Amino acid sequence: MMAHVERAAQDAEEIEGGCPAAAARMTEDDPILKAIVDFRSALEDYNANAPSQDSGAEIYAERTYRRPRRVIVNWETGARTRRGAVEALKLANDADRDGDYVIIGPMVRAALSYLENTI
């Protein structure tokens, strides 16, 4: 369940010299990181634990990944950090692979905003 959270934290620690406090600060410094970690964690939970019945799966989807997904789909601000831009692009790439195309635009725009502001 925590693979995506651990990956994002590990990536952040590597950038910040192995400091867990710095990794936690990165999600505070860039809200898009928290939104992406929340979505990936919730989706992983759903995939691992959703009931096989359609009605139960629908209820579980609403309780797990749908709210964080709506945050991603409705994202309107740019990434604030390089890590946030990279994670947004990774999520957009995964969404393209998985056919969840509505996620791609907001994540590409968030990454592009960061990149445009750094030139």
Image (cartoon, rainbow, N blue to C red):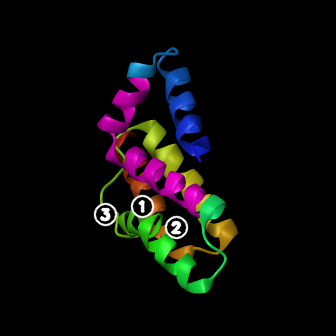
Between tags 2 and 1, which lies in front? 2
Whether tag 2 and tag 1 are in contact, CB under 8 A, the answer is: no
Label 3 sits on residue? 76
Label 2 sits on residue? 104
The kind of residue on which mark 2 rests is: Ile
Label 1 sits on residue? 109
Mark 2 or mark 3: whose residue is earlier in sequence: 3
Q: Against 116, is 82 above or below?
A: above
- Percent across and percent down for residue 21 are 38, 20
The kind of residue on which mark 3 rests is: Glu
Mark 2 or mark 1: whose residue is earlier in sequence: 2
The kind of residue on which mark 1 rests is: Arg
Q: Quadrant of residue 110?
A: bottom left
Magenta-colored segment: predominant secondary structure = helix
Q: Residue at x 52, y 44 (%)?
A: 86
Circle 3 packing at 10 Å, graded few (<14), some (14-19), many (20+), is: few
Residue 59 part of the magenta segment = no
Give the label on residue 119, or none.
none
Circle 2 packing at 10 Å, graded few (<14), some (14-19), many (20+), is: many
Decide which of 77, 37 is in the foreground and name it. Answer: 37
Q: Residue at x 44, y 52 (%)?
A: 38
Where disc 3 sits, the SS reads: loop
Residue 25 part of the magenta segment = yes
Q: Residue at x 34, y 41 (%)?
A: 30
> Which region of the structure is painted magenta?
22-46
